[in-house]
Amino acid sequence: MSLSAWPPAWDHKIKRYLQLEGEQEAEKRGGKLWREALNLCQHRTWHQIISLEEFNGLFEPYAQASQAVQRLLVGSDRVVLMAVSLGAGVEEQSRELLARNEIFAGFLLDRMGSYLAEWCMSSLDRQITEDLGAQGVKTTRRYSPGYQDFSLQAQKVFVDLAAEARTGINLRPDYSLAPEKSVTALKGIVSGS
């Protein structure tokens, strides 16, 4: 699934997120960095719909141990698994700028990468919700490993399943994602509503 609205515009939302609004010189520098960030992105998206039974089997024991996930999926008969990644370009350039002591540019580029990763996941989530809504089914909100009691170790299942789609997402020993600007999430599908 591609993100039809890519690339997101350099607008007041991103300027507010970066805390640049009203700072003319910072906004100007930010606009140049924004174009650089977009050029560095190699965004990939993946999603898969599985039955609740299959989800419980794949995510054992993480799903069963998470009261938050159990509450989220009440009434669901299927689950959507999602992953997005920007690739490593933004984080590598950010680190390089910081190493050269270009603190403003390095920090801002890193924040832009975080914004874009979340933007990609939100866009994918919204598109899936709209597509399923057109089929007459509702979805829950999305939820990611590492929140509340949903173990970060559950990232391994996402990474393994998304590998065939060549998202480029890998898992570090601490179960965080590499590249950093990657996000995984799930949401329930409630067909009987």
Image (tube, rainbow, N blue to C red):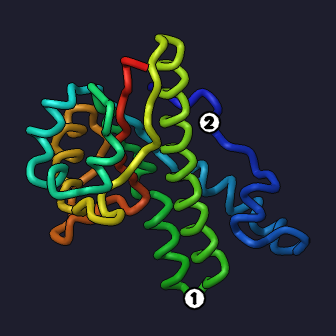
Q: How dense is the environment of label 2, judged by Cα within 10 Å: few (below 14), some, or many (20 and up)?
A: few
* Quadrant in which residue 32 is drawn: bottom right
Q: Please state the total of marks drawn on the protein image.
A: 2
Q: Which mark is residue 13?
A: none
Q: Residue 74's x, y, as percent?
A: 31, 38
* Quadrant in which residue 46 is drawn: top left
Tag 2's secondary structure?
loop
| 3D distance between C-alphas at marks 1 and 2 | 31 Å
Q: Residue 14's x, y, as percent?
A: 72, 58
For the point 20% across and 32% down, the residue is 164
Q: Which mark is residue 6?
A: 2
Query: Which part of the image, by quadrant, shows the C terminus?
Result: top left
Q: Residue 163's x, y, as percent?
A: 21, 39
Residue most toward the bottom?
A: 101
Tag 1's secondary structure?
loop
For the point 50% across and 28% down, the residue is 129
Where 123 sits versus 67, above or below? above
Query: Which part of the image, by quadrant, shows the N terminus?
Result: top left
Where 116 sits versus 50, above or below? below
Tell which circle, 1 or 2, labels the residue nearer the N-terminal end.
2
For the point 51% across and 49% down, the residue is 41
For the point 64% across and 40% down, the residue is 7
Q: Nearer the viewer, residue 174 or 32?
A: 174
- Relative placement, left or right, of 30 versus 107 is right
Where 105 sits versus 156, above or below? below
- Relative placement, left or right, of 63 versus 84 is left
Q: Amino acid at mark 2?
A: Trp
Instruction: Name the residue carrying label 1.
Output: 101
